[in-house]
Image: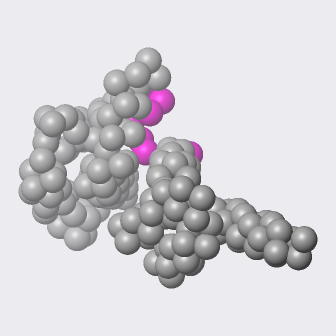
Amino acid sequence: MESRCAKLDQLDYFELLGLERTAAPGEIKKAFYKESRVYHPDRFFQLESKALKDQVNELYKRVTEAYYVLRDDTKRKKYLTDIAGPDRAQKLRFTDASESETKAAAKKEQEEQIGTHPKGRQFYAQAQKDLESGNPSAAERNLKMALTYEPSNARYKEALAEAQKQTADKSKGDSSFKIR
């Protein structure tokens, strides 16, 4: 155990749990439970050596950290990229900075999507077709429906404002035509 604790700073999460980098979620969970049973601090309460207890606690924390990162598909993907790069030694632990990078990447990916709800995306797509065919009032209705599924979607709100502007412009054009 002491030799394993000494190498702790050189092991990545896969090595720590004794897994291949292609391990399935079930294998990750199984390896975590195996390691956590072996190194759980409660098993070592009777030890007199505080230094050894601290090592066991550190090892257990690292095993738990490994499971926390590897069980999450997004974090595991980022972690695999990090440990495969030239800065491997600095990226062996998934830090708060890694966490914020992962969240920023996920947020960017979500923003690049048209929407998160399938029905919202469907209504948005129909609204786009309505706008292209010159029917802004139908687009407006579809965008309002899309917003019922995703009320905070900025893209839908912008498109709705544009459709409302086109509807207003069209009605002004129609009324000025009738007056003449």
Task: Examine the image and state in which quarter residue 177 appears.
Answer: bottom right
Judge whether residue 92 is colored magenta: yes
Residue lying farthest to the front in this orientation = 180
Q: Is residue 145 left or right of residue 19?
A: right
> Who's the residue at 44% across and 18% down the image?
86
Position above or below: 179 against 18 = below
Residue drawn 77% across the image and 71% down it: 174
Residue at the right extreme?
180
Image coords of residue 9 (percent x, y): 37, 35
Left or right, 80 with reference to 124: left
Residue 134, given in percent of the width and then of the height, sits at 60, 58
> With respect to residue 146, does 155 lie above or below?
above
Residue situated in front as seen by the camera: 160 or 157: 160
Say which quarter of the image contains residue 16.
Answer: top left
Name the side, left or right, on which 108 lies relative to 43: right
Looking at the rendered image, the quarter that the C terminus falls into is bottom right
The number of numbered discs placed on residues in the rendered structure image is 0
In the rendered image, is residue 115 in sight? no
Q: Nearer the viewer, residue 153 or 139?
A: 139
- Give the image location of residue 133, x and y in percent: 54, 56
- Which residue shows up at 37% across the image and 31% down it? 81
Instruction: Residue lying at the far bottom in this picture: please name it.
Output: 148
The reply, left or right, for residue 54 in relation to residue 44 is: right
Foreground residue, 16 or 144? 144
- Quadrant of image for the N terminus: top left
Judging from the image, the colouring scheme is one colour
Q: Which residues are magenta?
A: 89-97
Q: Position of residue 138 (x, y in %)?
A: 54, 72
Instruction: Residue at 22% x, 39% y: name it.
Output: 14
Q: Is residue 23 visible?
A: yes
Camera-nearest residue between 134 and 39: 134
